[in-house]
Image: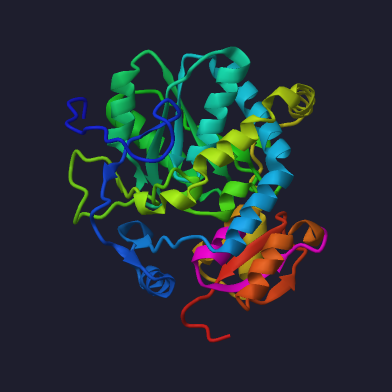
Amino acid sequence: MNKLTVQTTKMGSYPDQDVTFLLKDLSDITMEKSTMEREQAIQKGTHYSEMLPIEYKPTDEYMKLFYTSLEEAKHKVAVAVGIVAEQLVAERGFQTVLVSLARAGTPIGVLIKRYLSYKYDRELPHYSISIIRDRGIDENALQFILNQHPDSSITFIDGWTGKGAITKELTKSVAEFNASTGKNLSSELAVLADPGDCSSLFGTREDFLIPSACLNSTVSGLVSRTVLNNNWIHEGDFHGGKYYSELAAEDVSNLFVDTICTQYPLIATEVEDGLQDISKEDRKPKWKGLESIENIQRDYGIANSNLIKPGVGETTRVLLRRVPWKILVHPDAEMNLEHILILARDRGVPIEEYANMSYSCCGLIKPMEKES
């Protein structure tokens, strides 16, 4: 694996200094399916990574939701970035490479990189690579990074946790990579928000809306979800992705990052307070979210836990790009979930109060055999 033939390709709408995407460019290939086509294919056994959802131009309503949530949450997001970034420095120092998990992790990785540049005047390398549930991490991308930075550790970054599926996938994949290469990479995952209680490195465990969850490629550098399909990805390739340059007029990727960064001069005291609070906690993950999933599976007769998407971020995404069946809302959180309620009502999705979970809300995907 050390003799890689892969080439990096300029992808995405972020400045080169913010991030390098290690993805094979599949922009000229048509593989998009409608929401219903994808849902039917996935539930019949086709892996989600073999196709892509259609990337629509965001509606005015979604853009209004994004701008509103960005204004409301920019300070809170910046504080969470600062808290997780300071923990990274304390644990890893500056001899580490930031490796975001594409694509939800990419904006968060850019924010952490920019915070470290602002606070410490240090420019850490930052890459975005693919990890796919049940299929693992892109080992070619990992080896490429290690070849480029042989004396550095690697820090994996994602946006938020739900059930912890990606956390588990990362742990398994890194263990396999270490076993086959003799490396000793850490699989610890740094996240902005950890409502699933499955990460030891987090900015907050509060289940709140991170504005980048409102949109798809247009807040993630115009890059698609990652693709692993043998028709186009061959041995020695990076996992694939598409660059939707035709959506450039709708792109708010840099606006999102720039807006959060305006808060960095204002957050020092809150970051310090947050770090002190975390230092008093047992940061070891307790996986409280899994208990919630088991409760929901039992109470709603759902055999396949992949149809349960917990937390504000995942529920938002269910409403934007899957076929929702029901939205569960914790009674104590309803006042903070206006966007979830609006999206659900607009799509005619039933909303039910449900207190037996640790999340603010949860999206249930419609099983294709259910008619109600």
Name the quadrant containing residue 30: bottom left
Residue 263 visible to an observer of this rendering? yes
Horizontal side of residue 333 vs 124, given as left or right = right
Magenta range is: 315-332
Residue located 68% across and 63% down the image = 340
Magenta stretch: includes residue 170: no
Q: Where is residue 26 in the image (x, y as percent from the top left)?
A: 26, 50
The residue located at (74%, 29%) in the rendering is 278
Indicate the position of residue 29 as horizontal and vertical percent values: 23, 57
Vertical order, 37 against 1 (above or below): below
Residue 98 percent across, percent down from the top left: 46, 27
* Direction from residue 34 to residue 279 in the image, left or right: right
Residue at 68% of width from left, 26% of height from top? Answer: 264
Q: Quadrant of residue 8?
A: top left
Query: Which residue is at the front of the view, 370 or 59?
Result: 59
Q: Measuring 28% from the left and 62% from the top, which residue is drawn there?
A: 31
Q: Is residue 200 visible?
A: no
